[in-house]
Image (spheres, rainbow, N blue to C red):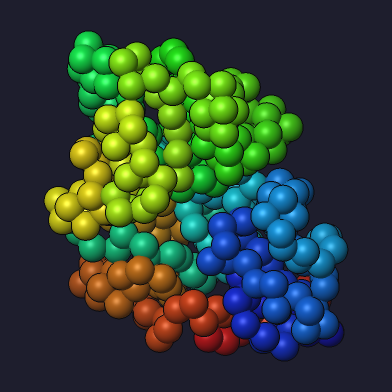
Amino acid sequence: MNKVTISLDPTRCIPADLAFVSHAHTDHLSKTYFKSGVNKVLTSKETMDIALARGFSIGRMHEDNSVQLLNTGHILGSRGLLVDHELFYTGDISIRKRAFMSAEQVPRVKTLIIESTFGRPHYIFPAVSEIIHKTNEIISQMYDHGIPVLLMGYPLGKAQLLAYLFRHWEPFYTYDSVASMNLIYRKYGVPLKDTMVFSEASEKGLLAKTKPWVMVCPVMHSGSTFVKFMKQKFGAVSVGFSGWAIDPRYRAAMGFDYALPLSDHCDYSELLEVVKLSGAEKIYTFHGFAAEFAISLEKLGFKAEALKSYPKRGRVRHRKPGVNRIDSYF
């Protein structure tokens, strides 16, 4: 039988027959790789559209009956790769229901390749409802004092959640780069409110210092030109959202007024849940705290191994159309 090699979220040139792109965050895309000859891509239509909107031409979509793409609940279009029901590569994953985001059931496989962004035991996130409550409290307090609020998250994924969860506040604006991603989310049926963008609101003089408003913005350091301008001219308060906010040093490092732990990744307990649900005989960990998570899994009786480096990606080789054995190369 013919062997087919698949490069996993390649960020450098890895000889392979196919490339798998799990989602459209830029650390999973490469402008140079897809000029190297591999133009058959396993990915979702949403990821293809978002990548193109962000300036990445990642080849042409390819279908292969020996693999399945499973929704991983990370961002719109994020997928994991299931190869012949024996190996599952998660890409970035979140099994926690968050507004309009949810994941498919974790498949049972022999081999699991799992991201370990938050692979240390102290990374346990509070319930999403708790984050919503705290954020609404902050906004309400600021509105009582006539202070505008900047809700800050990654412009793709987190910002759309913020735009949905806090859409009831008025006036409500979005940063221009966030609005461009919102358009794609709406194209795929996510009910995000069509709001005025920052540039237009600024031109029309709608961002008053004496009247409160809310704006969803990309994550920016307090020393950035934009944040300094918004604070100096409007007295705006910044609220940053990230899983890293579990660590109190994150707020100080970024210069946020408030920082709340809302993530598009699994926390430590959810990573363990993915491993258990998979029933995998062998687990490979990658990204973030890969070594620490592999050690934790070993202590719990799992056979686990951390991949040695990141962003060096894996390459999966399998036989087609049937698979007698799967070799994973890292």
Q: Is residue 147 above or below residue 261?
A: above
Q: Position of residue 254 (x, y in %)?
A: 26, 53
- Camera-side residue of 85 and 183: 183
Residue at 29% across, 49% down: 222
Q: Position of residue 109 (x, y in %)?
A: 54, 63
> In which image quadrant can residue 132 be found?
top left
Q: How many marks?
A: 0
Residue 177 visible to the viewer: yes
Q: Position of residue 9 (x, y in %)?
A: 61, 70
The answer to whether 269 appears left or right of 45 in the picture is: left
- Camera-side residue of 206 and 250: 206
Q: Is residue 35 above or below residue 107?
A: below
Q: Position of residue 124 (x, y in %)?
A: 23, 48
Q: Is residue 94 above or below residue 207?
A: below
Residue at 65% across, 39% down: 180
Residue 128 visible to the viewer: no
Residue at 54% across, 25% down: 201
> In which image quadrant can residue 263 be found?
top left
- Indicate the quadrant containing the N terminus: top left, top right, bottom left or bottom right: bottom right
The answer to whether 120 appears left or right of 211 in the picture is: left
- Camera-side residue of 216 and 62: 216
Residue at 60% across, 76% down: 11
- Camera-side residue of 97 and 196: 196
The answer to whether 30 appears left or right of 74 in the picture is: right
Furthest residue toward left: 248
